[in-house]
Structure formats: structure tokens, C-alpha cells
Amino acid sequence: MSREQVYNFSPGPSVLPESVLLRAQRELPDFAGCGMSVMEMSHRSKIFQAIFDETKEKFRQALGVPDTHEILFLQGGATLQFAMVPMNLLEGASADYAVTGNFSGKAAKEAAKYGAVRLAADTTATGHDRIPTQEELSLDPAAKYFYYCANNTIYGTEWQYVPETPSPLVCDMSSDILTRPVDVSKYALILAGAQKNMAPAGLTVVVIDRRLAGRELPITPEIMSYRTMIEKDSMHNTPPCWCIYMLGLVLDWLAEQGGIPAMEERKHARAQLLYDYLDESGLFIPHARPGSRSEMNVTFRTSSEELDAEFVKGAAARGLLNVKGHRITGGMRASLYNAMPMEGVEALLAYMKEFEVHHHV
Ligand SMILES: *Cc1c(COP(=O)(O)O)cnc(C)c1O
């Protein structure tokens, strides 16, 4: 199957804009006439420093990051941040965690190694099918921070509001960063693995209020210290050079498309198409409750695992790839990141309708 015949609904690493891939291909062997690839140059070279600085500036512009906050380009995925956040911000005290899915659960578990974790909310009992309301949050005024995951990639739920908390906000935005406007000044720290919406795997973007750096536990490895990474401008060691370059290309594409406002509009339109149908369907059952639904990862199933498997197989045969749900949840999941065109969602919808006609009892 060729790229032209495929829509890739992968939850991550996921689809990138084709124009970005083609530009990377053109620039791959010889970047800007310097005789070498970005993959081959020193991260301390002038030419790479320019790529780095420009990418950082483009990111600052795109998300509207204020001067109070530093942008870090790190490695280790969002998962390393599950440890880095408490090592740097918890000071051995207590933090509030809202557990609304797999990744916030993992983050809470990791943090408990470095201090006390209070569950401000926990939606495990209902299979993480919704986001708690502001009123439901149990908040500790003495907490060092409040941690939540903005979009639950596996379960398909997304916070539709920014929680009001007495403690600084820390948020995992791995799967919905650059898809909606964010008032960055409200956050002490934002973390995001790049491979869902920004770049290839290998880069983690952290946006941190500089005032919170410098409180790491003494055992914190140097490479895991926000203070060190701020002082060294993410170059305490070799950064993920290629991924940073690719992020720059994606940010150029994003700006050409109309920036975050355009992404948000498309995100609403894509998801609406699927949820409208899911709510009417006699065959497919959406997982997330209205009011909590993710516009990035739409999760659904039929009443039978055999039918689910048949659906996934039939989708793949039509070039609708990676619609199988996560192994934890089963069912199906359509991930609709920024680079997913509307035509992809329309093709998926057409297949769902046809499948329902053939299987509805
Ligand atoms: C994918 C994902 C993670 C895990 O990211 P890694 O880069 O694999 O560590 C964490 N949080 C969210 C919300 C994700 O979507």
C-alpha cells in the first residue's frame, strides 16, 4: 500500500504532514548548502544552534509562551517527566494527582517514590470514561503542585476546562499540545512527548516557570535537573538534534495553516463528525461520556470482540490503519492529530456506516 492509499490513525508515533516529510527529504543530505545533514552536524555548531534557536522561538510564538517560562528540549519521553517532575518540584512533600487514565496513574505511582501523593480525583472505577468536574476535585492547599493529564490518549477523554487549584498546575499535554490555545501563564509546568502532534519520537518538550527550578532533591541526576537544563539551554548533553529540526518544520507548517486557531477548528470538525455518528449508531458504542470526550483520540467499540477485530481488519484492508484500541481497553481508537486530514475522517466514517449496514441486527 502506498502513502496515497493510507490514512494513518496511529496514536503515536503518528502521522506527520506530508509536506514536512518531503521538505525533510529534500534537506536531508545537504542542509542549507552546508555540505552535511542535520543528522551529521555538531550540536555545538553555529548552524545547528540557529536551528535550535529558531525552533524554540517558533514554539514560543505558536503556543504563546511568556518570558517567565523556559522551553526545554529533553529526551526520555513523557515517561521520564513522571519522575523528573516530583524530583524537581515535590521537595519530599505532598502533591495532588488527578488520575483520569493510564498515564496520570503512572505519573502518580512514580511520584510516590519521592514524596506523598494525594489523589485529587480518580476515575478508575468507571473505566476512565469521564473527566471529573471542578467541584469533584479534592484539593490540598498545602500541595506542592496539582498534576493532571489534559488528554487521555488511551481512554479518549479530554479536560474541557483548566482546573482552578490552590497549588501550581503541572500538566501532561503529550497528546493535545498545539491543538488548542493554552494560557501558559496558568501553568507551572507543561510536558509533552513530541511523537503525538509535534515531531518524531525522541524529543520531549517541557515548558517550565523558571521560578520553580532549583528545588530538586539532592539525589536528582544532573541530566534530570530542570535547573541544569535551563542553565545549559537544554544542552547539558547532546540534545535530540534531528527531532528538534523536525519540530521546526512542523511549526512552519502549523503557521502556514493558520496556527493553533486553525488547528482547533479542524480538531472540533474532525471529532464532531465521528461523535455525531457514534451517538446515532445502533452498532458502535462510544467509550467517553459527553462533556469529557477527547477530540484527539475517539474511542469506541461494538458489543462483540469478534466484530471489533473484523472491523479493524476491514479498515486496514482499506488503508485505514491503526484503528485498533489500546491493549488495556480493547475496542477501537481513531487518533485525529493535527496532521490528519478531514478526508481521512470522512473515509473512516464511510467505512463505519457501511460496516454497520452489513452487521446491524
Ligand atoms: C504517549 C503518552 C505518554 C507516554 O509518552 P512516552 O514518550 O512514551 O514516554 C504519556 N502521556 C500521554 C498523555 C501520552 O499520550
Image: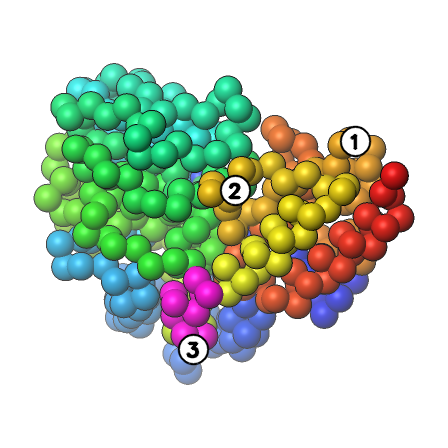
- In this rendered view, identify the residue nearer to me: 125 or 360: 360
- In this rendered view, identify the residue nearer to me: 10 or 151: 151
Q: Are marks 3 and 2 in contact (CB under 8 Å)?
A: no
Question: Is residue 96 visible to the viewer in this orientation of the structure?
Answer: yes
Residue 258: x %, y % from top left: 41, 74
- In this rendered view, identify the residue nearer to me: 179 or 223: 179
Residue 253: x %, y % from top left: 45, 72
Name the dominant secondary structure of the magenta segment: helix
Q: Identify the residue at image location x=83%, y=33%.
A: 306
10 Å crowding of disc 3: few (<14), some (14-19), many (20+): few
Residue 85: x %, y % from top left: 27, 34
Which residue in the structure is indicated by mark 3? 256
Q: Earlier in the sequence, mark 3 or mark 2?
A: 3
Q: Earlier in the sequence, mark 3 or mark 1?
A: 3
Q: Earlier in the sequence, mark 2 or mark 1?
A: 2
Give the vertical position of 41 relative to 114 (above or below). below
Q: Is residue 83 magenta?
A: no
In screen coordinates, is 105 left or right of 156? left
10 Å crowding of disc 1: few (<14), some (14-19), many (20+): few
The amino acid at mark 1 is Ser
State yes or no: Cβ of the residue under disc 1 lies below 8 Å from any atom of ligand 1: no
Q: Identify the residue at image location x=86%, y=50%.
A: 357
Which residue in the structure is indicated by mark 1? 304
Give the vertical position of 151 relative to 48 (above or below). above
Give the vertical position of 17 relative to 128 (above or below). below
Which residue in the structure is indicated by mark 2? 290
Quadrant of image for the C terminus: top right
Quadrant of image for the N terminus: bottom right
Task: Find the magenta span and give its range.
Answer: 257-265
Q: How is the image coloured?
A: rainbow
In screen coordinates, is 289 left or right of 2? left
